Amino acid sequence: MPPPAHWFFGDQLGPHFLDPRDGGPARDAPLVMVEAKSVFRRRRFHRAKAHLVLSAMRHRAAELGDRMRYVRAETYREGLREAVGDADVTVFHPTSRAALALAEDLERVTVLPARGFLVPHGDFARWAAGRGSRRLLMEDFYRGVRRSHDLLMEGDEPAGGRWNLDHDNREPPPRGAATLGAPAPWRPDEDAIDEEVRRDLDRWERDGDVSFVGRDGPRLFPATRREARAALRRFVHDRLPAFGPHEDAMLAGDPVLAHSLLSAALNLGLLDPAECVEAAEAAWRAGDAPLASTEGFVRQVAGWREYVWHLYWHFGEDYRHRNALRHHAPLPDWFLELDADAVTARCLGTVLAQVRDTGWTHHIPRLMVLGGYALQRGWDPAAVTDWFHRSFVDGYDWVMLPNVVGMSQYADGGLMTTKPYTSGGAYINRMSDLCGPCAYRPTERTGARACPYTAGYWAFVHRHRARLAHNHRTARPAAQLDRLNDLAELLREREEAGDGPP
């Protein structure tokens, strides 16, 4: 009896998704991938993201040759029917609830355990159950991953004697430097498949089938396994040593600093997280990278990425609709359109331009500049989540839902974090070179030179004073409201400003 066909989603592209061990597809199983145009009809994705995903899918199909049946269809359901008819099919656990629901609804489709992550669902469920009524702290989860995978361990103890080296990785950018001076990141050379994808996207837009946001080209991120491995090697050998100290810094002229730029390849399944953290650890043990930088990268991949993946499934579909702060304001058009040129505030304009031009910024601009502005203005967290999902090349439902609802917008009321992550302009001024030439002053709350983040922060604290006063991490700023002699003027100016670009 022939083995069932195996169906790949577009984020299951690496060789670990072909491994027949532990229930994977048989070596002679026919392979199927469906390019569904309906995915791009449903959401207005960043053009560079659409190009990257389709390029990666088509490159993988070309690599697998005759063994892969690559179908272009309106929907996954139609494409799968065209490819295999009513034959039996296996598929690895998809990364979104919508895709999982589809797979489970289809007849003769067997869903296999998830791949592409370090921690199986069952292991996380047992860990969460063992917490009882205690919060599911990322730090505790991360230590468990380190122990179980023997990552940066010296016997039973963490390498260097400390689990968390964040304190060493929070330096502002070097004073007076326009760039960090790290070696350049790996970048790809486009090929005929990239050109074909771009022609197809152009045609879809001309025909009115789909609409995109942002700019496309040239491609900046890996679309093949070979490219992803090259990008990993470049980071580990050339950029990891400089990564840690300034991973929270921002420079207008150096948006990538020493970041790995591997998230898109990881989330497409071109890289396995185990090979990434093991390569970083090997560099440290060889004396080629400092421990703080290595631990910072391992924390991102084996800690935060795994944690977010599991919380997406653990919290359930209702988590999407959490809105503890009752924020309902719609996203303004200038933000939806990535209209950076309309923005006067240099930090927000610079970061929004990075998203427009590349579909990427690192975690601090995402959290403190983009997310912080949305939180201060009371934008609907579901709409903010959708914007991040659509606008970033590494954005997927499982990535953005916990990151935005929980971490960025505090819409879950504290299930993930102990306080809202937002600040005035002082933080941005300390951690970047963005404030110096800006028309606004980070120390001013009112008047023509009032920083939108400083004024927005105090307006946010005022709006949620009752909640913040009862949180030990935010009680002090709530109490400080009584000492602001310009609070009434600040609130009036904020109301008059409305949703126009700052």
Image: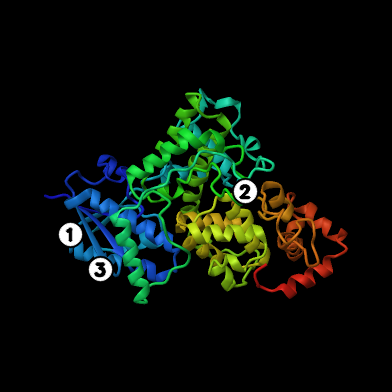
- Horizontal and vertical percent for residue 483? 87, 58
| Residue 409 visible within the image | no
Q: Nearer the viewer, mark 1 or mark 2?
A: 2
Which comes before the other along the chain, label 2 or label 3?
Answer: 3
- The residue nearer to you, when weighing 243 against 114, is 243
Q: Residue at x 50, y 50 (%)?
A: 308
Side of 181 relative to 16 (left or right): right
Measuring 47% from the left and 46% from the top, which residue is drawn there?
Answer: 261
Q: Disc 1 or 2, which lies upstream in sequence?
A: 1
Above or below, 327 against 109 in this view is: below
Tell whether 121 sits left or right of 165.
left
Is residue 140 placed above or below 45 in the rendered structure?
A: above
Counting from the top left corner in percent of width and height, residue 433 is at 67, 49
Q: Earlier in the sequence, mark 1 or mark 3?
A: 3
The total of numbered circles placed on residues is 3
**387 and 237: which is toward the camera:** 237
Q: Mark 1 sits on what residue?
A: 87
Residue 315: where, in percent of width, then height? 51, 55
Considering only vertical position in the picture, is 203 above or below 246? below
Query: In the image, which is nearer the foreground, mark 1 or mark 3?
Result: 3
Question: Mark 1 Cα within 10 Å, few/some/many (few <14, many 20+)?
Answer: some
Seen at 75% across and 49% down, the residue is: 472
Give the residue type at disc 2: Met
Reading the image, the residue beneath label 3 is 78
Q: Which residue is mark 2?
A: 250
The kind of residue tagged 3 is Glu
Front residue (pair 14, 470)? 14
Instruction: Report, in whole angstroms, how far the alpha carbon at label 1 lies from the one at label 3.
Output: 14 Å
Residue 148 appears left or right of 179: left
How would you rate the neighbour count of disc 2 (Cα within 10 Å): few for under 14, some for 14-19, many for 20 or more?
Answer: many
